[in-house]
Image (cartoon, rainbow, N blue to C red):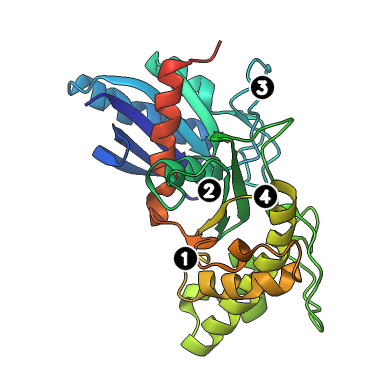
């Protein structure tokens, strides 16, 4: 088996693996602290695995963002204007590639999850689909014609505008836009609204929180459905995978679309689905990024 390295760089923890596809042969969890310590620990993990005889061909990094993804740009491989303290303008891909002497594939965590679900999960066999994560933040990765869609920057689906539900006076949690989709329906927004993280709420209040977030997500997905025309929407994340979340989004979406454009597929149970890889989608996608980098390394 050809082996690759995968890194899922998260806001609180970083997952490093060696493997291929969904087959993992080594794994480590590293706290995401300051950049130098975190990236040094990542490099050290892979050096140990290489010293143990594992022949790793490339590394794939699926990172929290925003990030610079334009190949050839001077800042390629950097985290840019993130709200995570100490991580703005941090080069992630460069130190990992230099420390290991290997090609590095680099993308957002949600794009990695989209790749994972497209190759091995709930979007397998589809050319055009969207992966949406609902958790600490809300973000999306769009696969168009079998490839992650990039332009000047990666997709920022969590920051689309959404109309407020009647009587909802919550100011919003987003530090940039306040009441965008992420500001109204992410995990931290729900914690502010209900006084505690969703997973700790009593059953009835948890159901109310999940259903509120799902209605806002369905409203935000109207923009996605109309702009990208996906064949399927895959939902993951800590809130997105909570009991009842995906069925609630699925139930709300046809009403949000208002009968336009009238496709029966939009009301089908197969149109909005839960991530089949669950919380492993991102790291499986990181290995897919590594596989791509081994074939087409950074120029």
Residue 151 in view? yes
Residue at the image position 38 percent from the left and 26 percent from the top: 43
| Pair 2/1: label in front | 1
Quarter of the picture holding the N terminus: top left
| Pair 2/4: label in front | 4
Horizontal side of residue 225 vs 233, given as left or right: right
| Pair 3/1: label in front | 1
Residue at the image position 67 percent from the left and 77 percent from the top: 193
Give how far apart the Cα atoms at labels 3 and 4 are: 31 Å
Give how far apart the Cα atoms at labels 2 and 3 are: 21 Å
Looking at the rendered structure, the secondary structure element under dot 2 is: loop
Query: Are circles 2 and 4 on residues that touch, CB within 8 Å?
Result: no
Horizontal side of residue 91 vs 166, given as left or right: left
Q: Earlier in the sequence, mark 2 or mark 4?
A: 2
Q: Which mark is residue 241?
A: 1
Give how far apart the Cα atoms at labels 3 and 1 are: 34 Å
Residue underneath mark 3: 75
| Pair 2/3: label in front | 3
Looking at the rendered structure, the secondary structure element under dot 4 is: loop
Residue underneath mark 4: 229
Characterize the local packing of mark 4: few (<14), some (14-19) or many (20 or more) Cα atoms within 10 angstroms: few
Instruction: Between residue 109 and residue 295, name the one nearer to us.
Output: 295
């Amino acid at each position: 088996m050809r082996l690759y390295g995968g890194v899922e760089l998260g806001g609180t923890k970083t997952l490093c693996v060696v493997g291929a596809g969904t087959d993992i042969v080594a794994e480590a969890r590293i706290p995401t602290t300051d950049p130098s310590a975190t990236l040094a620990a990542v490099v050290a993990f892979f050096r140990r695995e290489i010293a143990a005889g594992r022949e790793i061909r490339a590394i794939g990094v699926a990172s929290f963002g925003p990030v610079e993804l334009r190949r050839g740009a001077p800042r390629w491989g950097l985290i840019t204007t993130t709200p995570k303290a100490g991580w703005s303008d941090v080069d992630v891909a460069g130190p990992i590639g230099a420390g290991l002497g290997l090609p590095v594939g680099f993308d957002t965590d949600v794009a990695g999850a989209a790749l994972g679900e497209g190759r091995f999960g709930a979007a397998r066999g589809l050319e055009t689909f969207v992966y949406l994560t609902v958790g600490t933040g809300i973000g999306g990765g769009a696969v168009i014609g079998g490839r992650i869609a990039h332009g000047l920057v990666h997709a920022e689906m969590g920051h689309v505008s959404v109309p407020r539900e009647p009587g909802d006076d919550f100011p919003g949690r987003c530090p940039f836009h306040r009441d965008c989709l992420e500001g109204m329906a992410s995990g931290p927004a729900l914690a502010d609204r209900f006084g505690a993280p969703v997973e700790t709420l009593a059953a009835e209040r948890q159901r109310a929180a999940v259903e509120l977030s799902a209605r806002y997500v369905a409203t935000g997905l109207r923009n996605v459905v109309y702009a990208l025309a996906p064949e399927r929407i895959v939902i993951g994340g800590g809130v997105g995978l909570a009991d009842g979340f995906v069925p609630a989004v699925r139930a709300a979406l046809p009403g949000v679309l208002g009968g336009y454009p009238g496709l029966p597929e939009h009301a089908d149970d197969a149109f909005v689905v839960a991530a089949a890889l669950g919380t492993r989608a991102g790291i499986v996608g990181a290995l897919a990024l590594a596989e791509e980098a081994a074939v087409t390394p950074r120029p």
